[in-house]
Amino acid sequence: MTAAIEYSDIVEVRGPLLVLRGVAGVGWDEFARIRMASGEIRHALVLEVDRDLAVVQVLEGTGGVQRVGTSAAFDGSPLRIPVGPGWLGRVCNGRGEPVDGGPPVLAARTAPVNGHPLNPTMREPPADPVVTGVSVIDGLMTLVRGQKLPVFSVAGLPHLELATQIAAQATAGDEPFCVVVAAMGLTHADADAVRDALEERSAAGELTLFLNTADDPVVERILVPRIALTVAEHLAFDLGRHVLVVAADMTSYCEAVREISASRGEVPARHAYPGYLYSDLASLYERCGRIRGRPGSVTVLPMLTMPGGDITHPIPDLTGYITEGQIVLSTGVAARGGYPPVEPLASLSRLMRHGAGPGRTRDDHLDVAAQLLAALARARQVGELAELIGAAALSATDRRYLDVERAFGRDFVDQRATETRSIEQTLDRAWRVLSLLPRRELAMVSPDVLDARYVAARGGDDHG
């Protein structure tokens, strides 16, 4: 094997970047090894090549790197990682190096972290549910295998707890299923909490956890979701598993992209983010899906905090263009002590009909979800009216709607962070809420279903 040529003419050290001169035959996104004067080896990726100049980003950061005595050798190919079932049950850092005390992950095959382009004609539409065990999500905005469904949150809300809960208890029924978690920019306390909460599933060999903490090099944050998706793609499309990728927090990822862009001196766009942020996010989110003729699927659930709670900020705005719906967390629900603090009237899953209903969850699922949302919307209107004229002036039916809103939060939405509910339990709870209304108000549900479910929910009482 021919030894790689080492280049030592370092023009500049700028943030996480090195600028080398005199390089030849080096390509964009190529993997490199940086050898320091002390003999320490660091890893890098080529960001830009201009004639004999190459700009590389050092994954471990450039702290301690000197222009004199440092050299770089290029591999001639993009960064690749081993892929296979050996990742399951492991806890790794953002570069894919184990931090659980175990040996490095080895495999007979490797794959590029940027993935392989997928022929659009080979894609199958998302179908069948991923059951999260969280009633408000499973009941009203069902996550579908192959879907990308983001969670929009605000700083201070328990989005990380919700992400961890879903990762710990989600299933695909009786079919092979596993979870890959890409955690980015966490505090050490949060990282420890995530590890503890996911320990049982990890020990069962059903989960891979990639942890990037806030004090890790910012460049590492760029790699975390790419490595996670590469692992997930092999588990899904080569090994036939249904894989859920939970990425939290994508805002930390986008801020890392912005910081790297600023280090490169690129012209900023909205809020100083680079103009290519949309295509960068799309290159991640679009790696989910199903492939014709292969049994597995990759489903992506990205969590992101909206800076300042602004849903028009570039991060949620661009994410919304790429993905298929959103789950919005509400400070109002959280202030009332509700968990998970999901705002149902601002949330939706555009692919829910592909994952819920007859043959997938339960025959009455879609009708019940529509009726429950309609009742909640009516209850909000009645609540506004009550503030104007007083609750005593409301009709008996309107007061029932106020009861529905209270019962919806108490009996349907609220659940413990360690509580798992089946689809049956979720829909039965929905019926108990709807049973507070007179039967004539449930116009979105067929008479046959009403005969079977409404009477049972009311304990045999069918008056009204």
Image (spheres, grey):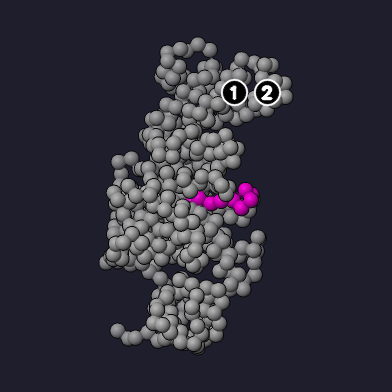
Image: 330 above or below 10: above
Q: Observer-nearest residue: 279 or 437?
A: 437
Crowdedness of circle 1 by 10 Å Cα count: few (<14), some, many (20+)? many
The furthest residue to the right:
388
Please report the residue visible at 66 percent of the width from the left and 19 percent of the height from the top.
Answer: 391
Left or right placement of residue 150 versus residue 421 in this view? right
Q: Which corner quadrant of the image does residue 318 belong to?
A: bottom right
Q: Observer-nearest residue: 259 or 448?
A: 259
Q: Please provide percent x and percent y for residue 189.
A: 46, 53
Q: Which residue is mark 1?
A: 402
Q: Observer-nearest residue: 97 or 303?
A: 97
Crowdedness of circle 2 by 10 Å Cα count: few (<14), some, many (20+)? some
Please report the residue visible at 49 percent of the width from the left and 67 percent of the height from the top.
Answer: 217
Question: Label 2 amino acid?
Answer: Ala
Q: Please provide percent x and percent y for residue 367.
A: 48, 29
Q: Please provide percent x and percent y for residue 187.
A: 49, 56
Residue 124: tell me if it is visible: no
Magenta highlight range: 302-311
Assign a secondary structure to mark 1.
Answer: helix
Assign a secondary structure to mark 2.
Answer: helix
Q: Please provide percent x and percent y for residue 2.
A: 32, 86
Q: Which corner quadrant of the image does residue 98 belong to?
A: bottom left
Image: 101 above or below 328: below
The furthest residue to the left:
108
Q: Which residue is mark 2?
A: 386
Q: Are marks 1 and 2 in contact (CB under 8 Å)?
A: yes
